[in-house]
Image: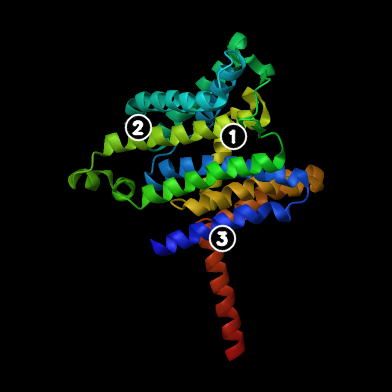
Amino acid sequence: MKRELLKYLLFCVLVLIAPLAFQDGYLLNVMVFVGINTILAVALNLLLGYAGQISLGHAGFFGLGAYLSGILTVTYTWNPWIAMPLAALFVGGLAFLIGFPILKLKGHYLAMATLGLGIIIYIVFNETIDLTGGPSGLSGIPNLSIGTFIFDTDVKNYYLIWTVTLATILLTINLVNSRIGRALRAVHDSEIAARVVGVNARLLKVQIFALSAVISSVAGSLYAHTMTFVSPASFGFNFSVELLTMVVIGGLGSIYGSFLGAALLTLLPEFLRAAHDYDIIIYGGLLMLMVMFMPGGLVRGIPDLFRRLIRGRGGAGNA
């Protein structure tokens, strides 16, 4: 646990000093999105990597958090700091209720059920024009503020988002290293065996599904108050698949792997813009290569690569 704490503190220091390396405001803005995507990837990894339950509907929970915060603050002029927890409470309650029937399913049936849930939420965003603005979106969402201090610049938003991201990572680390975390891993390995040793697998899966939804809702609220505009296009099926890819590429069952996956899939398209029409081909090819040669994800593949390089140099030196 001491080693885990040192790793976390080192990560915090790197996050705090990172803006010094990003003099360009655009790159700093991209790092804000890396933070939001890291929160989402951590939330999905709790469900997929630790509990072994797939979800293709997490973009829906992300969108619900964004829209609920936006509607409460724009239409009803609520304080954003009150709107955010209320949105998270609603999303968590909804996930808890629908989790009982949905999480009875397994494998691709569960994937299809969560996909359907995400599509339903997306359709609601598009069709409830009087409430959400429909395809045109909802604008005029206020920035978060503390007294007269308003989070209205890239630097301020960076530290706001990453403070929440670091808190989410710390919460998740404590959770997965607790008795609940061990129960989650037991359910992931064998649900029947977990039941035999006294784990209420069904309730635990629903609880972690709801917690994952709550974290996604918080990320959605932060997104809404940072961008001050939301539209359905940001919360569709494609983004759910992208979140799943972040978790798999980063490393299943790894909190820092969630960060690596989120960082790669957020930053890579930005660097590939110079390739113009070939960026999608390069992007897809790189992802294929990583899946082929780093099946355990970046968090395991990078150390393995370094070990192979060191062994290779050692062998060459002995020869």
Q: Earlier in the sequence, mark 1 or mark 2?
A: 2
Compared with 277, 100 (above or below) is above
Label 2: state its secondary structure: loop
Residue shown at the point (66%, 17%) measured from the top left: 135
Crowding near pointer 3: few (<14 within 10 Å), some, many (20+)?
few
Residue assigned mark 2: 103
Compared with 70, 253 (above or below) is below
- Residue 117 drawn at (x, y percent): 47, 24
Q: Which residue reaches farthest top?
A: 130
Crowding near pointer 1: few (<14 within 10 Å), some, many (20+)?
some
Residue assigned mark 3: 293
Q: Earlier in the sequence, mark 1 or mark 3?
A: 1
Q: Earlier in the sequence, mark 2 or mark 3?
A: 2
Report if residue 245 is visible in the image: no
- Comparing labels 2 and 3, the label whose residue is closer to the camera: 2
Q: Which residue reaches farthest front?
A: 148
Residue assigned mark 1: 239
Q: Nearer the viewer, residue 184 or 313?
A: 184
Report if residue 59 is visible in the image: yes
